[in-house]
């Protein structure tokens, strides 16, 4: 528990082991363009005002998922209050819980389903070539059985109620977005259970991140360059004034500047495979800053371990040959852990030779 960066960030000089090799350091962050409008912000029209037209939304989502693999959604139907309360409770958890409560959540054992840890996983902290400037709380958040709730933090006292409600609503939103994507890809008319319902989106994991202020943001990273291993991620950024998430686009890192009441959506590797490469799982990273702590909550929609992942048959034809072979999700997942930092290798073993 003493390894948590939230307990060490005030140490001077900066604690050892957090300086990244020069070629992957963020460097002078002022040169990274703060492009407010670069990642598309899409109005889903789900707040009762009936704004945008459905077919227009499908086009926007598909375009953003092809070009950036990332977009933000507004008027997504989840109340601002619920999102604020969720962030408030996470802030309380990371910043204010008494030592004994932190100790009861902390674990270096990656097999524990609800745990607080630091950097990659806490497990091999001393053997890590470099540590990430973040602490993380992870636990399953769907299906929400009583058993699942019992694993969750008991404190703050409203955590289970509020985060439970937020997870339920995020899950509904994820299904709506997946439904729009399946329409856009031509995988179904939007009736019935939809292409992405079922085993392929059966589970959801909450990964809440805490990035304390850092004395040397140009030398370290909160999270290194990576793509998400799951199907689809919905990310809540904790504070409208603190950015940190960056997406690699055409060789340049661009900031995903928080947009008021928005949620960030990104395509995971499984969606890239199922769409036969049409949708893009973009590489992204998290940079730190010296003045403010940052919180984010990622909701990872993912397949069951035994779910067979393969390109959708209707997307394969003479001009679009099949790019990936089919595999059970667990094969991907087990391999993913070994490719940390080597994003170009993640999908290699599943590619079909052209
Ligand atoms: C992740 C991630 C981004 C963030 O957890 O996979 O990319 O802003 N998080 O914390
Ligand atoms: Ni990610």
Image: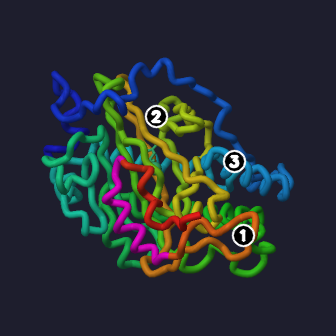
Q: Which residue is mark 2?
A: 244
Tell me if 207 is positioned left or right of 212 in this view. right
Tell me if 116 is positioned left or right of 307 in this view. left
Main secondary structure of the magenta stretch: helix
Secondary-structure class at tag 3: helix
Query: Is residue 334 within the magenta segment?
Result: yes
**First in residue order: circle 2 vs circle 1:** 2
Residue range (magenta): 327-341
Tell me if 183 is positioned left or right of 291 in this view. right
Secondary-structure class at tag 2: loop
Checking the image for residue 64, the label placed there is 3
Residue 172 appears in view? no
Q: Quadrant of residue 286?
A: top left
Secondary-structure class at tag 1: helix
Say which residue appears at 62% left-offset and 37% top-offset. Answer: 260
Say which residue appears at 25% left-offset and 63% top-offset. Answer: 110
Label 2 CB sits under 8 Å from any ligand 1 atom:
yes
Q: Quadrant of residue 334?
A: bottom left
Which one is in front, 149 or 199? Answer: 199
Q: Which residue is mark 1?
A: 315
Which one is in front, 145 or 220? Answer: 220
**First in residue order: circle 2 vs circle 3:** 3
């Amino acid at each position: 528990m003493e390894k948590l960066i939230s307990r060490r960030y005030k140490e001077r000089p900066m604690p050892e082991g957090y300086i990244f090799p020069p070629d992957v350091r963020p460097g002078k962050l002022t040169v990274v363009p703060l492009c407010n409008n670069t990642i598309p912000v899409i109005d889903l029209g789900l707040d009762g005002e009936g704004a945008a037209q459905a077919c227009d939304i499908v086009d926007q989502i598909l375009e953003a998922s092809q070009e950036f693999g990332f977009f933000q959604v507004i008027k997504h139907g989840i109340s601002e209050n619920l999102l604020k309360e969720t962030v408030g409770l996470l802030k309380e958890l990371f910043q204010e819980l008494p030592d004994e409560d932190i100790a009861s959540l902390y674990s270096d054992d990656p097999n524990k389903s609800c745990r607080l840890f630091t950097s990659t996983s806490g497990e091999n902290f001393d053997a890590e070539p470099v540590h990430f400037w973040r602490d993380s709380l992870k636990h399953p958040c769907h299906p929400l059985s009583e058993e699942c709730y019992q694993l969750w933090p008991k404190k703050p006292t409203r955590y289970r109620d509020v985060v439970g409600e937020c997870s339920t609503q995020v899950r509904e939103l994820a299904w709506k977005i997946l439904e729009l994507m399946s329409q856009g890809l031509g995988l179904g008319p939007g009736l019935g259970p939809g292409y992405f319902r079922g085993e392929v989106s059966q589970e959801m994991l909450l990964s809440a991140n805490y990035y304390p202020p850092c004395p040397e943001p140009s030398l370290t990273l909160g999270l290194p360059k990576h793509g998400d291993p799951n199907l689809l991620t919905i990310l809540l950024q904790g504070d409208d004034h603190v950015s940190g998430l960056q997406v690699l686009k055409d060789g340049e890192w661009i900031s995903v500047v928080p947009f008021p009441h928005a949620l960030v959506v990104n395509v995971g590797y499984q969606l890239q495979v199922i769409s036969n490469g049409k949708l893009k799982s973009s590489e992204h990273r998290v940079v730190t800053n010296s003045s403010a702590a940052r919180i984010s909550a990622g909701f990872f929609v993912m397949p069951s371990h035994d779910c067979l992942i393969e390109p959708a048959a209707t997307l394969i034809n003479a001009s679009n040959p099949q790019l990936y072979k089919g595999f059970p999700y667990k094969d991907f997942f087990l391999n993913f852990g070994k490719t940390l930092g080597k994003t170009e290798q993640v999908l290699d073993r599943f590619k079909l030779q052209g």
